[in-house]
Amino acid sequence: MNMFNLSKLLNRIYTARLPELKDLEQVLSLNDPKQLNVLFSFADTVRKEFCGDGILLRGIIEFSSYCSRECFYCGLHKSNHKLKRYRMSEDELFKAVEYLASCRIKTLVLQSGQDDSLDALWFKDIISKIKSKFDMAVTLSLGEKSMDEYGVWRQAGADRYLLKIETFDKELYESVHSGMSLDNRIKCLNYLRALGYQLGSGNIIGLPGQTLKMIAQDIIFFKRGDFDMIGIGPFIPHQDTAFANRQKGEVNLCLKAIALTRIVTKNAHIPATTALGSMDKDYRFDGLKCGANVLMPNFTPQPYRKLYEIYPGKRCVDEPVGRCSFCMDNMAKEIGRFIDYSRGDSLKERKVSANV
Ligand code: 5AD
Ligand code: FES
Protein backbone atom coordinates (compact mmCIF):
# COMPACT_ATOMS: atom_id res chain seq x y z
CA MET A 1 0.00 0.00 0.00
CA ASN A 2 1.36 3.44 -0.83
CA MET A 3 1.26 6.35 1.62
CA PHE A 4 -1.68 7.98 -0.14
CA ASN A 5 -3.78 4.83 0.21
CA LEU A 6 -2.69 4.41 3.82
CA SER A 7 -3.87 7.95 4.65
CA LYS A 8 -7.16 7.24 2.92
CA LEU A 9 -7.56 4.01 4.86
CA LEU A 10 -6.82 5.70 8.21
CA ASN A 11 -9.26 8.50 7.41
CA ARG A 12 -11.94 6.00 6.53
CA ILE A 13 -11.42 4.24 9.89
CA TYR A 14 -11.41 7.58 11.71
CA THR A 15 -14.63 8.86 10.20
CA ALA A 16 -16.62 5.61 10.22
CA ARG A 17 -19.43 5.27 12.74
CA LEU A 18 -18.27 1.67 13.05
CA PRO A 19 -15.08 0.72 11.19
CA GLU A 20 -14.88 -2.22 8.81
CA LEU A 21 -13.22 -5.33 10.22
CA LYS A 22 -11.09 -5.77 7.12
CA ASP A 23 -9.80 -2.19 7.31
CA LEU A 24 -8.64 -2.74 10.88
CA GLU A 25 -7.07 -6.06 9.95
CA GLN A 26 -5.19 -4.42 7.14
CA VAL A 27 -3.72 -1.79 9.47
CA LEU A 28 -2.83 -4.44 12.06
CA SER A 29 -0.83 -6.27 9.41
CA LEU A 30 1.34 -3.24 8.50
CA ASN A 31 5.05 -3.81 9.11
CA ASP A 32 6.93 -1.19 7.15
CA PRO A 33 8.47 1.27 9.67
CA LYS A 34 7.48 4.29 7.52
CA GLN A 35 3.88 3.14 7.42
CA LEU A 36 3.89 2.48 11.15
CA ASN A 37 5.10 6.04 11.67
CA VAL A 38 2.16 7.36 9.67
CA LEU A 39 -0.24 5.26 11.77
CA PHE A 40 1.34 6.27 15.07
CA SER A 41 1.42 9.97 14.27
CA PHE A 42 -2.20 9.87 13.08
CA ALA A 43 -3.17 8.32 16.45
CA ASP A 44 -1.04 10.87 18.29
CA THR A 45 -2.89 13.70 16.56
CA VAL A 46 -6.25 12.19 17.53
CA ARG A 47 -5.03 11.83 21.14
CA LYS A 48 -3.94 15.47 21.17
CA GLU A 49 -7.22 16.69 19.75
CA PHE A 50 -9.48 14.71 22.10
CA CYS A 51 -7.39 14.33 25.28
CA GLY A 52 -4.79 17.08 25.13
CA ASP A 53 -1.15 16.80 26.22
CA GLY A 54 -1.81 15.98 29.88
CA ILE A 55 -0.93 12.49 31.08
CA LEU A 56 -3.35 11.28 33.75
CA LEU A 57 -2.16 9.20 36.68
CA ARG A 58 -3.98 6.25 38.22
CA GLY A 59 -2.28 5.02 41.39
CA ILE A 60 -2.78 1.28 41.76
CA ILE A 61 -2.83 -0.75 44.97
CA GLU A 62 -2.94 -4.51 44.45
CA PHE A 63 -4.51 -5.33 47.79
CA SER A 64 -5.25 -9.05 47.45
CA SER A 65 -3.63 -11.80 45.40
CA TYR A 66 -6.20 -14.48 46.21
CA CYS A 67 -7.76 -15.88 43.08
CA SER A 68 -10.30 -18.62 42.48
CA ARG A 69 -9.90 -18.71 38.70
CA GLU A 70 -7.69 -20.60 36.28
CA CYS A 71 -6.72 -18.14 33.55
CA PHE A 72 -4.01 -19.93 31.58
CA TYR A 73 -1.88 -16.81 31.16
CA CYS A 74 -1.95 -15.36 34.66
CA GLY A 75 0.54 -16.06 37.44
CA LEU A 76 -2.11 -15.54 40.12
CA HIS A 77 -4.19 -18.50 38.93
CA LYS A 78 -5.66 -20.65 41.68
CA SER A 79 -3.50 -23.74 41.34
CA ASN A 80 -0.24 -21.80 41.46
CA HIS A 81 0.69 -23.06 44.91
CA LYS A 82 4.17 -21.58 44.68
CA LEU A 83 2.71 -18.16 45.24
CA LYS A 84 2.29 -16.86 48.78
CA ARG A 85 -1.15 -15.24 48.90
CA TYR A 86 -1.99 -12.07 50.81
CA ARG A 87 -4.86 -9.73 51.51
CA MET A 88 -3.84 -6.37 52.97
CA SER A 89 -5.43 -5.26 56.24
CA GLU A 90 -7.54 -2.14 56.46
CA ASP A 91 -4.68 -0.37 58.24
CA GLU A 92 -2.15 -1.30 55.59
CA LEU A 93 -4.51 -0.26 52.86
CA PHE A 94 -5.17 3.09 54.48
CA LYS A 95 -1.49 3.84 54.88
CA ALA A 96 -0.95 3.09 51.20
CA VAL A 97 -3.89 5.30 50.19
CA GLU A 98 -2.63 8.12 52.41
CA TYR A 99 0.75 7.94 50.74
CA LEU A 100 -0.83 7.94 47.31
CA ALA A 101 -2.88 11.04 48.22
CA SER A 102 0.27 12.78 49.45
CA CYS A 103 1.70 12.31 45.93
CA ARG A 104 -1.26 14.38 44.61
CA ILE A 105 -2.78 11.39 42.86
CA LYS A 106 -6.52 11.79 42.37
CA THR A 107 -7.44 8.32 41.09
CA LEU A 108 -6.99 5.22 43.20
CA VAL A 109 -7.27 1.81 41.55
CA LEU A 110 -7.97 -1.02 43.98
CA GLN A 111 -7.13 -4.29 42.29
CA SER A 112 -7.19 -7.94 43.34
CA GLY A 113 -7.43 -11.40 41.84
CA GLN A 114 -10.88 -12.96 41.68
CA ASP A 115 -10.94 -13.04 45.50
CA ASP A 116 -14.15 -14.91 46.31
CA SER A 117 -13.57 -14.64 50.06
CA LEU A 118 -13.46 -10.87 49.96
CA ASP A 119 -16.05 -9.62 52.45
CA ALA A 120 -18.21 -7.26 50.40
CA LEU A 121 -19.33 -5.26 53.44
CA TRP A 122 -15.82 -4.95 54.86
CA PHE A 123 -14.78 -3.63 51.48
CA LYS A 124 -17.76 -1.29 51.25
CA ASP A 125 -16.68 0.27 54.54
CA ILE A 126 -13.20 0.82 53.19
CA ILE A 127 -14.57 2.53 50.08
CA SER A 128 -16.80 4.82 52.18
CA LYS A 129 -13.92 5.78 54.44
CA ILE A 130 -11.61 6.52 51.53
CA LYS A 131 -14.28 8.60 49.82
CA SER A 132 -15.03 10.61 52.93
CA LYS A 133 -11.41 11.23 53.83
CA PHE A 134 -9.81 11.88 50.45
CA ASP A 135 -10.73 13.84 47.38
CA MET A 136 -10.18 11.10 44.83
CA ALA A 137 -11.92 8.90 42.31
CA VAL A 138 -12.02 5.23 43.27
CA THR A 139 -11.68 2.61 40.55
CA LEU A 140 -12.26 -1.05 41.34
CA SER A 141 -10.75 -3.99 39.51
CA LEU A 142 -11.89 -7.10 41.36
CA GLY A 143 -13.20 -9.31 38.58
CA GLU A 144 -16.63 -10.86 38.16
CA LYS A 145 -18.95 -10.25 41.11
CA SER A 146 -22.72 -10.16 41.68
CA MET A 147 -24.88 -7.18 40.76
CA ASP A 148 -25.56 -6.77 44.51
CA GLU A 149 -21.88 -6.47 45.35
CA TYR A 150 -21.25 -4.05 42.49
CA GLY A 151 -24.26 -2.07 43.71
CA VAL A 152 -23.15 -1.89 47.34
CA TRP A 153 -19.72 -0.62 46.33
CA ARG A 154 -21.18 1.88 43.92
CA GLN A 155 -23.43 3.21 46.67
CA ALA A 156 -20.42 3.48 48.94
CA GLY A 157 -18.93 5.84 46.36
CA ALA A 158 -16.87 3.75 43.95
CA ASP A 159 -16.70 5.69 40.67
CA ARG A 160 -15.20 3.36 38.09
CA TYR A 161 -14.67 -0.33 37.35
CA LEU A 162 -12.11 -2.11 35.18
CA LEU A 163 -13.10 -5.49 33.82
CA LYS A 164 -11.08 -6.30 30.73
CA ILE A 165 -12.67 -8.51 28.12
CA GLU A 166 -9.14 -9.90 27.46
CA THR A 167 -10.39 -11.23 24.10
CA PHE A 168 -13.84 -10.85 22.57
CA ASP A 169 -13.49 -14.10 20.63
CA LYS A 170 -15.79 -16.53 22.44
CA GLU A 171 -13.85 -19.64 21.55
CA LEU A 172 -10.47 -18.16 22.46
CA TYR A 173 -11.91 -16.56 25.59
CA GLU A 174 -13.32 -19.83 26.85
CA SER A 175 -10.23 -21.83 25.94
CA VAL A 176 -7.84 -19.60 27.92
CA HIS A 177 -10.21 -19.04 30.87
CA SER A 178 -10.97 -22.50 32.15
CA GLY A 179 -14.53 -22.70 33.52
CA MET A 180 -15.46 -19.12 32.59
CA SER A 181 -17.85 -17.80 29.95
CA LEU A 182 -17.73 -14.76 27.73
CA ASP A 183 -21.46 -14.30 28.32
CA ASN A 184 -20.97 -13.88 32.05
CA ARG A 185 -18.22 -11.36 31.44
CA ILE A 186 -20.60 -9.31 29.30
CA LYS A 187 -23.38 -9.70 31.84
CA CYS A 188 -21.05 -8.22 34.50
CA LEU A 189 -20.16 -5.31 32.21
CA ASN A 190 -23.86 -4.61 31.72
CA TYR A 191 -24.50 -4.64 35.48
CA LEU A 192 -21.65 -2.19 35.98
CA ARG A 193 -22.87 0.08 33.25
CA ALA A 194 -26.44 0.03 34.59
CA LEU A 195 -25.12 1.00 38.02
CA GLY A 196 -23.47 4.07 36.54
CA TYR A 197 -19.82 3.10 36.88
CA GLN A 198 -17.35 4.63 34.45
CA LEU A 199 -16.34 1.45 32.70
CA GLY A 200 -13.00 0.09 31.55
CA SER A 201 -12.28 -2.73 29.12
CA GLY A 202 -9.20 -3.91 27.29
CA ASN A 203 -7.43 -6.93 25.89
CA ILE A 204 -4.17 -8.87 25.83
CA ILE A 205 -2.18 -8.79 22.61
CA GLY A 206 -0.46 -12.03 21.56
CA LEU A 207 -2.51 -14.56 23.50
CA PRO A 208 -1.71 -18.03 22.11
CA GLY A 209 -4.25 -18.72 19.35
CA GLN A 210 -5.16 -15.07 18.78
CA THR A 211 -5.39 -13.79 15.20
CA LEU A 212 -5.31 -10.26 13.75
CA LYS A 213 -8.99 -10.64 12.95
CA MET A 214 -9.72 -11.29 16.63
CA ILE A 215 -7.83 -8.14 17.63
CA ALA A 216 -9.80 -6.19 15.03
CA GLN A 217 -13.00 -7.60 16.56
CA ASP A 218 -11.83 -6.51 20.02
CA ILE A 219 -11.40 -2.95 18.73
CA ILE A 220 -14.91 -2.96 17.28
CA PHE A 221 -16.17 -4.25 20.64
CA PHE A 222 -14.41 -1.32 22.37
CA LYS A 223 -16.12 1.10 20.01
CA ARG A 224 -19.59 -0.46 20.34
CA GLY A 225 -19.29 -0.59 24.13
CA ASP A 226 -18.34 3.09 24.25
CA PHE A 227 -15.92 2.33 27.10
CA ASP A 228 -14.51 5.14 29.20
CA MET A 229 -11.12 3.43 29.52
CA ILE A 230 -9.34 0.76 27.48
CA GLY A 231 -6.17 -1.02 28.63
CA ILE A 232 -4.16 -2.88 26.00
CA GLY A 233 -1.03 -4.82 26.91
CA PRO A 234 1.22 -7.53 25.44
CA PHE A 235 1.04 -11.13 26.65
CA ILE A 236 4.04 -12.01 28.84
CA PRO A 237 4.48 -15.74 29.56
CA HIS A 238 4.70 -16.70 33.22
CA GLN A 239 6.78 -19.74 34.17
CA ASP A 240 4.15 -21.23 36.49
CA THR A 241 1.25 -21.21 34.04
CA ALA A 242 -0.05 -23.42 31.25
CA PHE A 243 1.38 -20.86 28.79
CA ALA A 244 4.91 -20.92 30.24
CA ASN A 245 6.53 -21.83 26.93
CA ARG A 246 4.47 -19.69 24.60
CA GLN A 247 5.77 -16.71 22.65
CA LYS A 248 5.35 -13.31 24.19
CA GLY A 249 3.13 -10.73 22.50
CA GLU A 250 4.74 -8.53 19.86
CA VAL A 251 5.39 -4.97 20.96
CA ASN A 252 4.64 -3.50 17.55
CA LEU A 253 1.35 -5.33 17.29
CA CYS A 254 0.41 -3.98 20.70
CA LEU A 255 1.30 -0.44 19.61
CA LYS A 256 -0.73 -0.84 16.41
CA ALA A 257 -3.72 -1.97 18.51
CA ILE A 258 -3.33 1.04 20.82
CA ALA A 259 -3.07 3.43 17.87
CA LEU A 260 -6.13 1.97 16.15
CA THR A 261 -8.12 1.99 19.39
CA ARG A 262 -7.33 5.68 19.81
CA ILE A 263 -8.33 6.46 16.22
CA VAL A 264 -11.57 4.50 16.54
CA THR A 265 -12.67 5.43 20.08
CA LYS A 266 -11.39 9.05 19.98
CA ASN A 267 -11.69 10.14 23.62
CA ALA A 268 -11.40 6.94 25.67
CA HIS A 269 -8.72 7.01 28.36
CA ILE A 270 -5.97 4.65 27.24
CA PRO A 271 -3.07 3.73 29.54
CA ALA A 272 0.45 2.93 28.49
CA THR A 273 0.17 -0.32 30.44
CA THR A 274 2.63 -1.70 32.96
CA ALA A 275 2.92 -4.83 30.77
CA LEU A 276 4.12 -2.59 27.93
CA GLY A 277 6.75 -1.24 30.34
CA SER A 278 7.83 -4.72 31.35
CA MET A 279 9.24 -6.03 28.06
CA ASP A 280 12.93 -5.91 27.00
CA LYS A 281 12.73 -2.13 27.43
CA ASP A 282 10.18 0.39 28.63
CA TYR A 283 7.74 0.71 25.72
CA ARG A 284 5.35 2.90 27.70
CA PHE A 285 7.01 5.88 25.98
CA ASP A 286 6.07 4.43 22.63
CA GLY A 287 2.54 3.80 23.88
CA LEU A 288 2.22 7.43 24.95
CA LYS A 289 3.37 8.53 21.51
CA CYS A 290 0.79 6.48 19.60
CA GLY A 291 -2.43 7.18 21.43
CA ALA A 292 -2.08 6.52 25.17
CA ASN A 293 -2.79 9.32 27.68
CA VAL A 294 -2.62 7.55 31.06
CA LEU A 295 0.07 6.04 33.31
CA MET A 296 -0.51 3.75 36.27
CA PRO A 297 2.11 4.16 38.99
CA ASN A 298 2.24 1.30 41.47
CA PHE A 299 1.53 2.06 45.14
CA THR A 300 1.35 -1.51 46.43
CA PRO A 301 3.64 -1.61 49.48
CA GLN A 302 6.27 -4.29 50.02
CA PRO A 303 6.38 -7.18 50.72
CA TYR A 304 3.12 -7.50 48.77
CA ARG A 305 4.22 -5.86 45.57
CA LYS A 306 6.70 -8.66 44.84
CA LEU A 307 4.01 -11.25 45.48
CA TYR A 308 1.52 -9.86 42.97
CA GLU A 309 3.21 -11.57 40.08
CA ILE A 310 0.70 -11.62 37.24
CA TYR A 311 3.60 -12.00 34.82
CA PRO A 312 7.37 -12.11 35.38
CA GLY A 313 9.62 -9.08 35.06
CA LYS A 314 6.78 -6.77 36.04
CA ARG A 315 8.41 -3.38 36.21
CA CYS A 316 9.05 -1.48 39.42
CA VAL A 317 8.68 -4.49 41.75
CA ASP A 318 11.78 -3.36 43.62
CA GLU A 319 11.11 0.37 43.55
CA PRO A 320 10.26 2.07 46.83
CA VAL A 321 6.58 3.05 47.05
CA GLY A 322 6.01 6.45 45.47
CA ARG A 323 9.14 6.33 43.35
CA CYS A 324 6.98 5.63 40.32
CA SER A 325 5.11 8.91 40.49
CA PHE A 326 8.38 10.92 40.39
CA CYS A 327 9.52 8.78 37.53
CA MET A 328 6.35 9.61 35.62
CA ASP A 329 7.03 13.33 35.80
CA ASN A 330 10.33 12.63 34.05
CA MET A 331 8.71 10.39 31.47
CA ALA A 332 6.23 13.12 30.58
CA LYS A 333 8.94 15.78 30.26
CA GLU A 334 11.04 13.54 28.09
CA ILE A 335 8.32 13.44 25.45
CA GLY A 336 7.25 17.07 25.73
CA ARG A 337 4.06 16.38 27.66
CA PHE A 338 3.05 17.04 31.28
CA ILE A 339 1.42 15.21 34.17
CA ASP A 340 -2.17 16.24 34.67
CA TYR A 341 -2.94 15.83 38.38
CA SER A 342 -6.71 16.06 38.03
CA ARG A 343 -9.13 13.17 38.58
CA GLY A 344 -9.40 12.54 34.87
CA ASP A 345 -13.04 11.51 34.74
CA SER A 346 -14.53 10.02 31.60
CA LEU A 347 -14.51 12.26 28.53
CA LYS A 348 -17.59 10.49 27.18
CA GLU A 349 -20.87 12.28 27.09
CA ARG A 350 -23.34 9.69 28.18
CA LYS A 351 -26.84 10.79 29.03
CA VAL A 352 -28.42 7.34 28.94
CA SER A 353 -26.63 4.24 30.11
CA ALA A 354 -26.41 2.04 27.04
CA ASN A 355 -25.77 -1.71 27.07
CA VAL A 356 -22.35 -3.10 26.15
N1 5AD B 1 0.65 -11.08 30.34
C1 5AD B 1 0.11 -9.88 30.11
N2 5AD B 1 -0.97 -9.39 30.76
C2 5AD B 1 -1.51 -10.18 31.69
N3 5AD B 1 -2.57 -10.00 32.50
C3 5AD B 1 -2.71 -11.09 33.27
N4 5AD B 1 -1.76 -11.98 32.97
C4 5AD B 1 -1.00 -11.46 32.00
C5 5AD B 1 0.14 -11.91 31.27
N5 5AD B 1 0.70 -13.10 31.50
C6 5AD B 1 -3.40 -8.77 32.49
C7 5AD B 1 -4.86 -9.08 32.24
C8 5AD B 1 -5.54 -8.61 33.49
C9 5AD B 1 -4.59 -7.57 34.01
C10 5AD B 1 -4.70 -7.31 35.48
O1 5AD B 1 -3.32 -8.14 33.75
O2 5AD B 1 -5.30 -8.31 31.13
O3 5AD B 1 -6.80 -8.05 33.24
FE1 FES C 1 8.02 2.97 38.59
FE2 FES C 1 9.52 4.44 36.99
S1 FES C 1 7.49 3.90 36.74
S2 FES C 1 10.01 3.76 38.98
Image (tube, grey):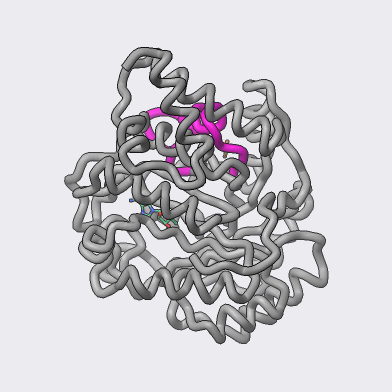
Query: How many marks do you count on the picture?
Result: 0
Residue 344 x, y percent position in the rendering: 72, 49
Residue 318 x, y percent position in the rendering: 51, 43
Snapshot quadrant of residue 196 = bottom right
Q: Nearer the viewer, residue 287 or 346?
A: 346
Q: Can residue 81 be seen at all in this image of the molecule?
A: no
Quadrant location of the N terminus in the rendered image: top left
Residue 73 x, y percent position in the rendering: 28, 55
Q: Nearer the viewer, residue 174 or 125?
A: 174
Snapshot quadrant of residue 252 = top left
Left or right of residue 3: residue 133: right
In this view, 205 is above or below 193: above
Q: Can residue 177 be seen at all in this image of the molecule?
A: yes
Q: Residue at x 47, y 78 (%)?
A: 145
Left or right of residue 272: residue 155: right
Q: Residue at x 69, y 74 (%)?
A: 127
Left or right of residue 326: residue 20: left
Residue 290 located within the stretch drawn in magenta:
yes
Q: Residue at x 32, y 25 (%)?
A: 30
Q: Which residues are magenta?
A: 274-295
Residue 13 x, y percent position in the rendering: 46, 35
Residue 146 located within the stretch drawn in magenta:
no
Q: Residue at x 27, y 44 (%)?
A: 213
In this view, 317 is above or below 107: above
Q: Nearer the viewer, residue 320 or 132?
A: 132
Left or right of residue 334: residue 225: left
In this view, 201 is above or below 331: below
